[in-house]
Image: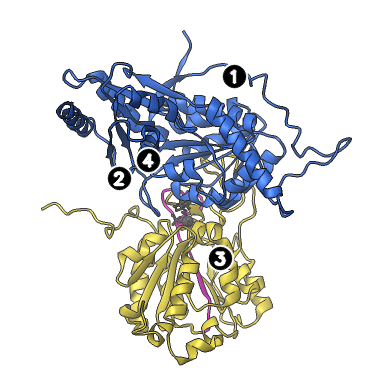
Chain colours: A yellow, B blue
Amino acid sequence: MNKIPSDMDIAWCPGCGNYSILETFDKAIEQTGIDRKKLALVSGIGQAAKFPHYTKANVFNGLHGRALPAATGLKIANHELSVVITSGDGDMYGEGGNHFLHAIRRNIGVKVFVHDNQVYGLTKGQASPTSDLGFVTKVQTHGVVSVPVNPLAVAIVEDASFVARSFAGDKEHLLAMMVAALENQGGFTLLDILQPCISFNRTNTLKWYKDRVKKIDESHDPYNREAAIAMSLKWGDEIPIGIIYRSRRESFEAKTSMLAKGTLVSQYKGAAV
Amino acid sequence: MPERILMTGNEAMAEGAIRAGCRYYYGYPITPQNEVPEYMSRRMPEIGGTFIQSESELAAINMVLGSAATGKRAMTSSSSPGVSLKMEGISYIAGQQLPAVIANVQRGGPGLGDIGASQADYFQATKGGGHGDYRLIVLAPASVQEMADLATLAFDLADRYRNPVMILADAQIGQMMEPLVWKDYTPPADLPAKDWALTGAKGRAKNIIRSFFLYPGLLEKHNIALQEKYRLIREREVRFEETNVEDADLVIIAYGSPARVAKGLVKRGLDNAKIGLMRPITLYPFPDKRIRELALAGKDFLVVELSAGQMVEDVRLAVEGASKVGFYGRLGGAMVTIDEMAQKAKDMLKSRRASK
Ligand SMILES: Cc1ncc(C[n+]2csc(CCOP(=O)(O)OP(=O)(O)O)c2C)c(N)n1
Ligand SMILES: [Mg+2]
């Protein structure tokens, strides 16, 4: 019998870095023991943003660029949920860039997993905010002329709770980073995942990343902000992966007295109108 | 014979804009209009123009606003979800009376929808969309040739009325390829001088571009002036095309890609029934006077749209009960078919005979 195609069927290119991110995510959920009934996956639009459809969780798939405000609303209403955003570099740092700045200031306790392939995948290969200078596409025919966004440095400057980078081509490292990110209780959690896009990014290939990524030395103290900034600025021949920064700043939920009495959804049970 | 060139609708629109002197294009990727920024990014550097892929649609429309304020021909394009984001800027451009061109290559909605052809943004384009009492001039191309021709016309109309013009296309017209012929373009000699533009106030009083009028009474005056302008536009700029209308009992009214299907039906014929097609080319100003005339001449109408029924409301307003108005629409990115249209037309003609 022919299967009827559905939105839940994976629609990523064979060989896409997203597959190992998906596989590793499922392992990380298993390892952390997070109850999938209390897991909410929030996304905007893009190849990365299709992710929530392909695993088991509560799903909110909203507007391009707006995953963060939607996730913020969700987390405030029910802060006992693990709220994880799966987003692309275009979705989170371009269209959603303003929300990125302000959600970090708030230190809302959501986990942001960015599948950073340095390109707009879904719309077929335009430069993204993280594309390197000189990156040539069918739109940036003379190469990208704007300096790339450095999301890690931005997050550290704004004192995010947890800032890390990993690589889809190293599942073991990715698993460790996902587990650490999921277990972080402090507030805004950013995990930028370098993800080869085999169709539209022929520059930053699996090999390109493999030749450059380097695990951060254990001597690095993530609570040292200056050292973290310096680490976040490294890019090129050597790209550090690992936990770059942690802060001890209170999360939005911890600061909000209303939430001390329990989740808003439980406080208002029965009062639904 | 003039050379016929094969192009997609999106590329034809981009080249039409460039030939009209547009040198400033700002856009953000979205399907099914990505061919417009792709084309602009290639062509603009060749002709001394500027292309920017902005960080969002909001940035793009405000870049257009800025370039337009200097009196230059500027444009942005997007598809439905991205056009919704531009609405804030469009309201300001209308309030500030700036000439600018915005293209919407519509896809299915609401929300993210899909990437199929749709006309569900008709209300948004013709009735406002953004806040305040403003109107866009709305042009509806139905062929690749018209994508080019109306892109050029859009800039002339924008300059003539200092008003934003929207090209309301759909995924089908944007994506398909057809031959077209380039016509020589010179801007109309009677376009008003842009003495309002921000060009540096050396030797003259300063120009101020704004939509902000706090002093009591000023904003109403400004609005009355806008309404007077819209009245002039309604009087002078109505455009439509008719096929076999004079002697028809039933006139199909459709624009954009459904109008092509309807034309197919009118040409094929429907047994011995007398059917015709009226295709609005301007959706604002709407050809309501002509539709009223046809209604008073005893013709019934079948409105065909890729929506749940939006333009049909304007047809009913024009007809004011003088004859019958039927509707056939497909939703969410689906295309109308000639057979379904024929069936609707037959049903209407049958009830017409029964009531006579
Ligand atoms: C308002 C709006 N603008 C534009 C788009 C088109 N669009 C969909 S996804 C996307 C960017 C995709 O790039 P990224 O976020 O890096 O995700 P990837 O596909 O690379 O995983 C764009 C521009 C849209 N859906 N909505
Ligand atoms: Mg991407």
Q: Main secondary structure of the magenta part?
A: loop
- Under circle 4, the secondary element is helix
Residue B52 in the image: state x and y as whole percent.
Answer: 61, 44
Q: Residue A165 or B55: which is nearer the viewer?
A: B55
Q: Which residue is mark 2?
A: B331
For discs 2 and 4, the disc positioned in front in the rendered view: 4
For discs 2 and 1, the disc positioned in front in the rendered view: 2
Disc 2 to disc 1, C-alpha distance: 38 Å
Extreme bottom residue here? A261
User: Magenta segment range?
Assistant: A186-206
Whichever of callouts 2 and 1 sits on the residue coming sooner in the sequence is 1
Q: Which residue is mark 4?
A: B313
Disc 1 to disc 4, C-alpha distance: 36 Å
For discs 3 and 4, the disc positioned in front in the rendered view: 4
Which residue is drawn at the image coordinates 86% and 36% (left, top)?
Answer: B204
Task: Evaluate whether residue A239 shows in this view.
Answer: no
Host chain of mark 4 = B
- Under circle 3, the secondary element is helix
Disc 1 to disc 3, C-alpha distance: 45 Å
Say whether mark 1 and mark 2 are on the same chain.
yes
Say whether mark 3 and mark 1 are on the same chain.
no
Amino acid on which disc 2 is placed: Leu
Whichever of callouts 1 and 4 sits on the residue coming sooner in the sequence is 1
Amino acid on which disc 3 is placed: His
Q: Is mark 2 within 8 Å of ligand 1?
A: no
Q: Which residue is mark 3?
A: A99
Is the residue under label 4 in contact with that under label 3 (CB below 8 Å)?
no
